[in-house]
Amino acid sequence: MTFTVHNFEIFLLILVRITAFVYVAPFFSLKNVPQKVKVGFSLFFSLILFQTVPGQIQYDGVIGYAALVINELMVGLIIGFFTNVSYYILNFAGSMMDMEIGFSMVNEFDPVSNVQTTITSNYYSYIVMLMMLVTNLHHYIIKAMVDAFKVIPIGGASISPNLYILMLKFIKDYFIIGFRIVLPVFAGMLIVNSILAILAKIAPQLNMFVIGLQLKVFVGLLILFLLVGFTQTVSGFIFDEMLAMMKSAIEALSQGFTWGG
């Protein structure tokens, strides 16, 4: 392909969208992924897409091209953000579990996500991350990003109020799915608290604080052990939700999208 300024402008717009997506998308945005890998992957991926993406753009002057760059930047960030929302559902669920079990007092700094996390949050996050690699989910994410250029051509994104409605829906789903995951632990802790309340009435001389703390940890670990067999089911549900959120974000950004229509 002959190199021209027009071709370089198109390549730069593709690179902006892909780079923005890589820096916020699940797995790719992890802090322990070297910056050189992120930049190199973005350049290599953009170079491949440049051969297939239709290259017809229209703009007026430097300001018009700058608007296209900002538009592509927002597209990449929004798609990556919505894809990553479902991944953080597990962090929310793990934090709620640790709050009930009593592990929330041992928060630790996670250098991967660069935030304070709990033990169970880290456990679920790393397990699902491994499942994502084993099941090749990252291939589907990359393919969806390629297909996004067909649905949302360069400069064709439409930032509409429908996107805010979609965001509110995902926030609602975030809490609903998180509470569904943590429900077995909630039920177990409810039974434990009921037993402790009965024992406090029957034998008030017992130190229920010491007994309750140890009993909650034991029962909580037992429930987590029993839930190991459902990890694959939970991971599959999260993966489906992740792809659905990504697809919805792409549709919301494409022209002619109407929520609920």
Image (cartoon, rainbow, N blue to C red):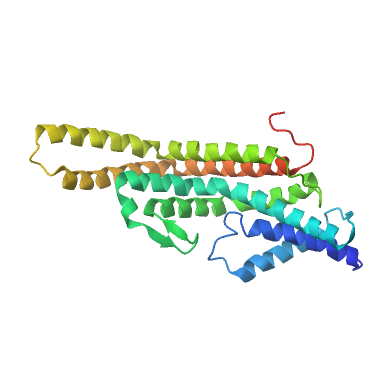
| Residue 84 horizontal side relative to residue 197, left or right | right
The residue at the point 49 percent across, 62 percent down is: 112
- Count of marks, rendered view: 0
Relative to 17, is 3 above or below? below
Q: Quadrant of the C terminus?
A: top right
Determine the residue located farthest toward the top in the rendered image.
261
The residue at the point 52 percent across, 51 percent down is: 131
Quadrant in the rendering for residue 240: top right
The answer to which of 112 and 124 lies nearer the viewer is 112
The answer to which of 93 and 218 lies nearer the viewer is 93
Q: Residue 150 placed where, x, y %?
A: 79, 46
| Residue 88 horizontal side relative to residue 255, left or right | left
Determine the residue located farthest toward the bottom in the rendered image.
36
Determine the residue located farthest toward the left in the rendered image.
205
Q: Quadrant of the N terminus?
A: bottom right
Q: Residue 70 placed where, x, y %?
A: 75, 57
Quadrant in the rendering for residue 63: bottom right
Relative to 44, is 253 above or below? above
Q: Residue 156 placed where, x, y %?
A: 81, 47
| Residue 69 horizontal side relative to residue 127, left or right | right
The residue at the point 42 percent across, 51 percent down is: 121
Q: Residue 171 placed where, x, y %?
A: 55, 40
| Residue 123 horizontal side relative to residue 162, left or right | left
Quadrant in the rendering for residue 209: top left
The residue at the point 50 percent across, 45 percent down is: 89
- Asked if residue 48 shows in the view, the reply is no
Relative to 169, is 148 above or below? below
- Asked if residue 144 shows in the view, the reply is yes
The answer to which of 137 and 199 lies nearer the viewer is 199
